[in-house]
Image: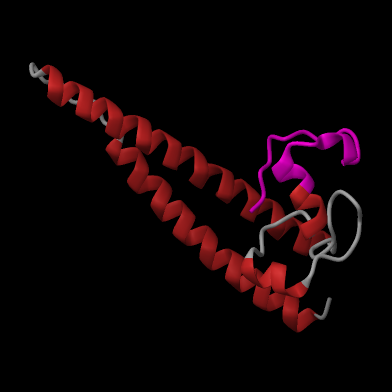
Amino acid sequence: MEVVQLKKFKRALKAQQMVAIHNLGESREILAVEGSADEMDQTGRSAEREFAILGLNRRSELLRNIHTALRRIEDGTFGTCTNCDEAIGRNRLVAVPWTPFCIRCQEVVDRGDTRMMEPPYELDIHAA
């Protein structure tokens, strides 16, 4: 991949990283536990916290994926599928610059069929 393209991807990833960090902070504020005598209020706040936790987990995962993509830029492996070592399509990288997989391998991950993945792949990273 050309240096100019890598710099564009790096800028885009850094911008996404800043947004993810900001959103992560906002999600944490929602998790504050407030006492209430009203059972309905407690139930509503509990549901809000559960929703916030799901969002926090998604944002944390996105942040990890962005960080990993930035490391791949630095080590020269950005744009190459981490499973099959094939080039990741440019359109896919533009849409999801933090993805570690080509579209074919991502489809395998989405199906949950890791038998086709290079071992020892684990499904703890869900790329977009």
Residue at horizontal 48 percent and vertical 60 percent from the top: 18
Q: Farthest residue toward the front? A: 111
Residue 95's place in the image compared with 109, above or below, is below
Q: Position of residue 20 (x, y in %)?
A: 48, 54
Q: Toward which corner of the image does residue 86 lie, by quadrant?
A: bottom right
Quadrant position of the N terminus in the picture: bottom right
Give residue 59's position: percent from left, percent from top.
49, 47
What residue lies at 72% left-to-right and 35% top-to-bottom? 123
Q: Is residue 93 above or below residue 61?
A: below
Was residue 113 drawn as part of the magenta stretch in this picture?
yes
- The residue drawn where x is 89% and y is 40% is 116
The majority secondary structure of the magenta stretch comes to loop
- Residue at image position (85%, 64%) is 76
- Residue 28 location, quadrant: top left
Report whether 56 appears left or right of 74: left
Q: Which residues are magenta?
A: 108-128
Q: From the viewer's perspective, is 27 left or right of 11?
A: left
- Looking at the picture, the colour scheme in use is secondary structure
Q: In the image shown, does 38 or 23 lie closer to the viewer?
A: 38
Q: Residue furthest bottom?
A: 4
Across and down, in percent, residue 103 comes to 77, 59
For residue 117: magenta?
Answer: yes
